[in-house]
Image (tube, grey):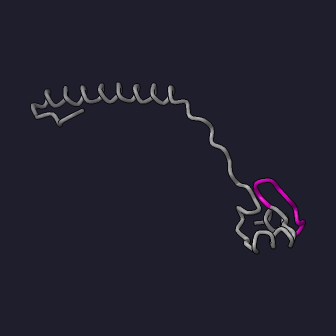
Amino acid sequence: MDRIINTYKAREDIEKFAHAASLDEIRENDYNMNIPRYVDTFEEEEPVDLDAVVKELEAFDEEIKAVDAEIEKYCVELGIKAPILR
Protein backbone atom coordinates (compact mmCIF):
# COMPACT_ATOMS: atom_id res chain seq x y z
CA MET A 1 0.00 0.00 0.00
CA ASP A 2 2.90 2.32 0.75
CA ARG A 3 4.19 1.89 -2.79
CA ILE A 4 0.81 2.81 -4.25
CA ILE A 5 0.42 5.85 -2.01
CA ASN A 6 3.98 7.07 -2.63
CA THR A 7 3.62 6.60 -6.39
CA TYR A 8 0.34 8.52 -6.34
CA LYS A 9 1.82 11.39 -4.32
CA ALA A 10 4.86 11.62 -6.61
CA ARG A 11 2.68 11.32 -9.74
CA GLU A 12 5.16 8.80 -11.15
CA ASP A 13 5.00 6.72 -14.30
CA ILE A 14 6.25 3.22 -13.48
CA GLU A 15 6.13 0.57 -16.20
CA LYS A 16 3.52 -2.12 -15.53
CA PHE A 17 2.51 -0.34 -12.30
CA ALA A 18 1.40 3.29 -12.67
CA HIS A 19 0.71 6.04 -15.18
CA ALA A 20 -0.04 9.68 -14.45
CA ALA A 21 -2.61 10.41 -17.15
CA SER A 22 -3.25 13.97 -18.25
CA LEU A 23 -6.79 15.31 -18.45
CA ASP A 24 -6.47 15.35 -22.24
CA GLU A 25 -5.53 11.66 -22.24
CA ILE A 26 -8.48 10.83 -19.99
CA ARG A 27 -10.79 12.85 -22.23
CA GLU A 28 -9.46 10.99 -25.32
CA ASN A 29 -10.45 7.75 -23.57
CA ASP A 30 -14.00 9.08 -23.04
CA TYR A 31 -13.27 9.45 -19.33
CA ASN A 32 -12.84 5.70 -19.06
CA MET A 33 -10.64 5.12 -15.99
CA ASN A 34 -10.07 1.38 -16.45
CA ILE A 35 -6.47 0.61 -15.51
CA PRO A 36 -5.63 -1.39 -18.69
CA ARG A 37 -6.26 1.76 -20.74
CA TYR A 38 -3.30 3.41 -19.07
CA VAL A 39 -1.07 0.68 -17.61
CA ASP A 40 0.04 -2.34 -19.64
CA THR A 41 0.35 -5.24 -17.20
CA PHE A 42 0.69 -7.98 -19.83
CA GLU A 43 3.60 -10.32 -19.27
CA GLU A 44 4.50 -12.80 -21.95
CA GLU A 45 4.61 -16.42 -20.85
CA GLU A 46 7.71 -18.48 -21.38
CA PRO A 47 7.37 -21.06 -24.14
CA VAL A 48 6.66 -24.62 -23.05
CA ASP A 49 9.18 -27.29 -24.05
CA LEU A 50 6.72 -29.90 -25.32
CA ASP A 51 9.43 -32.53 -25.81
CA ALA A 52 10.36 -32.25 -22.13
CA VAL A 53 6.68 -32.47 -21.12
CA VAL A 54 6.21 -35.62 -23.22
CA LYS A 55 9.30 -37.23 -21.63
CA GLU A 56 8.00 -36.36 -18.17
CA LEU A 57 4.59 -37.85 -18.96
CA GLU A 58 6.22 -41.00 -20.31
CA ALA A 59 8.28 -41.32 -17.11
CA PHE A 60 5.10 -40.91 -15.02
CA ASP A 61 3.39 -43.56 -17.12
CA GLU A 62 6.25 -46.02 -16.50
CA GLU A 63 6.11 -45.27 -12.78
CA ILE A 64 2.35 -45.88 -12.74
CA LYS A 65 2.81 -49.21 -14.52
CA ALA A 66 5.39 -50.27 -11.92
CA VAL A 67 3.08 -49.32 -9.04
CA ASP A 68 0.17 -51.12 -10.70
CA ALA A 69 2.28 -54.28 -11.02
CA GLU A 70 3.26 -54.03 -7.35
CA ILE A 71 -0.38 -53.64 -6.29
CA GLU A 72 -1.33 -56.64 -8.37
CA LYS A 73 1.48 -58.68 -6.77
CA TYR A 74 0.25 -57.81 -3.26
CA CYS A 75 -3.31 -58.74 -4.22
CA VAL A 76 -2.12 -62.17 -5.41
CA GLU A 77 -0.22 -62.67 -2.13
CA LEU A 78 -3.35 -61.73 -0.16
CA GLY A 79 -5.54 -63.94 -2.30
CA ILE A 80 -7.84 -61.12 -3.31
CA LYS A 81 -8.98 -59.85 -6.65
CA ALA A 82 -6.80 -57.06 -7.94
CA PRO A 83 -8.51 -53.81 -8.81
CA ILE A 84 -8.88 -53.00 -12.48
CA LEU A 85 -5.71 -51.18 -13.30
CA ARG A 86 -4.78 -49.33 -16.44
Query: Considering depth in this image, is 68 or 21 the residue closer to the camera?
Result: 21
Rendering quarter of residue 16: bottom right
* Residue at point 77%, 62% (across, down): 38
Quarter of the image with the N terminus is: bottom right
The secondary structure that most of the magenta stretch takes on is loop
Compared with 84, 1 (above or below) is: below
* Residue at point 70%, 61% (across, down): 36
Compared with 37, 15 (above or below) is: above
* Residue at point 75%, 59% (across, down): 39
- From the top left corner, tell me how far across and down residue 42 is, in percent: 68, 51
Residue that protrudes farthest toward the right in the picture: 10
- Total count of labels: 0
Rendering quarter of residue 3: bottom right
- From the top left corner, tell me how far across and down residue 40 is, in percent: 73, 55
User: Is 9 one of the magenta-colored residues?
Assistant: yes
User: Is 13 one of the magenta-colored residues?
Assistant: yes
Compared with 54, 37 (above or below) is: below
Q: Is residue 1 left or right of residue 10?
A: left
Query: Considering depth in this image, is 80 or 83 the residue closer to the camera?
Result: 83
Q: Is residue 28 left or right of residue 79?
A: right
Compared with 51, 3 (above or below) is: below
Quarter of the image with the C terminus is: top left
* Residue at point 79%, 61% (across, down): 18
- From the top left corner, tell me how far across and down residue 61 is, in percent: 35, 28
Q: Is residue 40 left or right of residue 22?
A: left
Residue that protrudes farthest toward the left in the picture: 79
Q: Give the magenta range.
A: 8-18
